[in-house]
Image: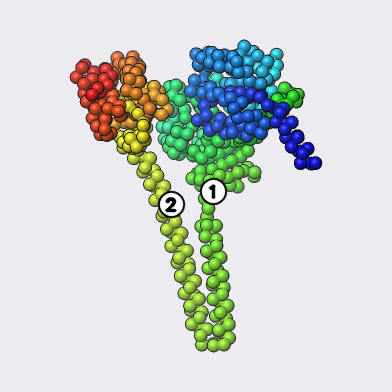
Amino acid sequence: MLRYCLFFLLLTSQACFAGQKVLLLNSYHSQYQWTRENIQGIQQELSKHIAEENIFIEFMDSRRFIDDPVHINALASLYRNKYRQVRPDIIISTDDFALDFLLQYRDEIFPDVPVVYNGINFDPSEKLLGKKGYVGILEGEAIAQNLAMIANIHQDSINEIIVLSDKNSLGELFSQEVLKVQKEWKNKKIKITLNNDFSYESLLYQVNNLSQNKAYFITALHKDNQDRYFSYTHDIPILTRYSKAPVYGMWGSPLMGLGIVGGYMNNPKTHGANAGQLAIKILSGETVDSQVQRKALFSPRFDARQLNKFAISQHTLPTNSEFNFIEISLAEKYQSVIYSVLIIIFVLLLIIIILSIQIRKRKIAEGSLAELNNDLEDKIVRRTIALESSNRALLKLNNRMEKLANTDDLTLIPNRRHGHRILDRLNYIDNSEYSIALIDIDHFKQVNDQHGHDFGDQVLQHITQTISQCIRPSDTICRWGGEEFLLIMPDTKIEHAQLTCERIRQIIGSTPMPPLEKVTISTGISNKTLARSNNELLRQADKALYNAKSQGRDICISWQN
């Protein structure tokens, strides 16, 4: 009887949510780890009640298009058309950008659809005045908490904490919070400095050369003052590798493991699960108090490797701290071996004692043998420790040499060696069509002769930044040699590669670089379908580049069989 009752309750529960649709509107892209884990937490709760095909997920990619009204209008037009007939029963928004978008467009595109927001850093009460159907959970921030903790950890070793932010709308809100803390700061030994106006290159120089007696704290970085997109997974490891000072943050998933020491950090998956539970309650007809806004928990988390790197004692950290990436000691790793050796030694000693009672003359010989065994075991342990230490040092050195071998020191982009690797990998993929382009700076020798090699280096860095901003995340720009670059474009036909290169040429040619009126480039393009090997593909692009130069330069030419 109990079995049938449980079965009936299960059917009733599923029927309650049958056909209901949920829209997940994400401010950022799924490449951003915080968003990815936050969605996992939401889906974990929704999947218990909502069919998979009734969960719609949209990524607004606002980290790349922050404060871009054209992008916002384009998204509004897209969602207006897409959800004209498929109306969601509830919307779950993640982070500030999506909530601001819904406050502007929900009544037009999704009239009367309730909204559950999460990932909001600042109290939205003022924004929500007069708005109905909005309820959610604050992500909040832990700026003051982190700055106080950093000051406590480094109270005798630093005199300044530099807080990194940017100039976009969200960055400005974080900057205001930093200024509030700065105004109320009572530590006279350590000052707080807000830096929200820098280029990525200048930041790398600062952390590498001007970081004595300092610590860094990251709030939120989307773009630098050169409008360069800031990628956590790519840029943070480089930043922390160059930094001679400890770097802290408060976003757990995007930062932990990338060289950040740690800080009071949040858990996006738990945060998403709470938002999913709230949405299920609303869908089931439960009335939820729209004024209740729970705040996500920020707890102290640290990377044990970085604690060792900066000689930070665990005694200076909060008592409830969580430690990640803890290296297993040799004693723990070889615990069973050590126990076995100790047991063997104990048995041998016992045998020696028994034999000494029976044969006194053998006592000296047995004792000598036991000492010899102990010495041998000690030598084995010392040799094992020495070998393990040497292996770790060699492994770290090999990893560093591998990174240096594949990166151009001047432009910080992949070098020729790495470019060959990418071409070889693409060549092994069946039915993969890709295009390449050899890009050469016109009259670059004259630039060096007339303005010096330092200015020539600036031109190379300027060209690198411009090309990087014009290509897709899947494309790769490599420094091929001197003033020549190789652009690799996977899944790209030659005519589309021509359009991309032409756009790059026009942007570079229209951007003055005093004292030069302009810098121009010539480009040779080829496609895998036109060549039998990568060497032939490179020769074709090189010949096309030669044709571009012979036709007066400042032109893009594609290879034709």
Question: What's the amino acid at mark 1?
Answer: Ile
- Residue 194 appears in the picture as rendered: no
Return the residue found at the far right.
1
* Residue at 51 percent of width and 23 percent of height: 61
Which residue position holds label 1? Answer: 326
Foreground residue among 259 and 290: 290
Query: Nearer the N terminus, badge 1 or badge 2?
Result: 1
Q: Indicate left or right for 424 with 395 as reference.
A: left
Q: Is residue 509 above or below residue 384?
A: above
- Residue 561 appears in the picture as rendered: yes
The quadrant holding residue 7 is top right
* Residue at 47 percent of width and 34 percent of height: 233
Q: Indicate left or right for 373 with 109 as reference.
A: left
x, y percentage for residue 315? Answer: 60, 47
Foreground residue among 395 and 112: 112
Q: Indicate left or right for 394 with 560 as reference.
A: right
Rendered-image quadrant of the C terminus:
top left
